[in-house]
Image (cartoon, rainbow, N blue to C red):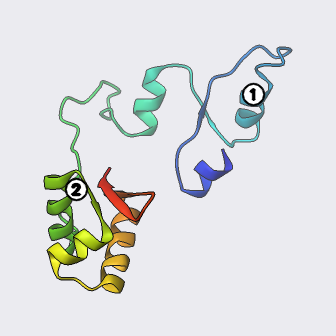
Amino acid sequence: MQQANGYGRDVFAVPGRLKDKFSQGCNYLIKKNMAQLLESAEDVATLLRWSREDGSPSANVAQGKLFDELTEPEKTVVDLLQANEEMGVDQLSYATAIGQSELAALLLNLEFKGIVRSLPGKRYVLC
């Protein structure tokens, strides 16, 4: 829970019976304002701004464009990962002609943006 808040993620909790030991955790999170009260799916939609101001669900929810913010080397790496599903750092470095240190920084930025994920053995995949 604290990790989710540390990343700026929304946390939801479903309230339970007051005397039920299995409900103590959720009730505590709600009481301490560490989680949003979740009573229905509309609560999630409202908090994530998936509904119009009049309260009805929006048919035209705008989705952000994923690759608008990428630099040219980042686009090259993403294109390679799309074509090959999974690649190692050495393969990426050879295919892109980008040095190891520059590629490591580039891959870290892509991880921060939530576009790639690292696997064991210095391998990368798209999220």
Residue at image point 29% right, 33% down? 52
Residue 34 in sight in this render: yes
Identify the residue under disc 2: 66
Q: Earlier in the sequence, mark 1 or mark 2?
A: 1
Looking at the image, residue 22 sits to the left or right of residue 84; the answer is right
The correct choice, above or below, for 107 with respect to 51 in the image is below
Q: Nearer the viewer, mark 1 or mark 2?
A: 2
| Mark drawn on residue 27 | 1
Q: Quadrant of the N terminus?
A: top right
Q: Position of residue 29 (x, y in %)?
A: 72, 36
- The secondary structure type at the circle numbered 1 is helix
Categorize mark 2 by other alpha carbons within 10 Å: few (<14), some (14-19), many (20+): few
Q: Quadrant of residue 67?
A: bottom left
| Mark drawn on residue 78 | none
Residue 34 vs residue 51, the one in the foreground: 34
Looking at the image, residue 55 sits to the left or right of residue 10; the answer is left
Categorize mark 1 by other alpha carbons within 10 Å: few (<14), some (14-19), many (20+): some
Residue 67 vs residue 123, the one in the foreground: 123
Query: Could you tell me the amino acid type at mark 1?
Result: Asn
Q: Position of residue 60 (x, y in %)?
A: 18, 35
Residue 58 vs residue 95, the one in the foreground: 95
Q: Quadrant of residue 76?
A: bottom left
The correct choice, above or below, for 117 with respect to 53 in the image is below
Residue 69 vs residue 33, the one in the foreground: 69
Residue at image point 61% right, 57% down? 6
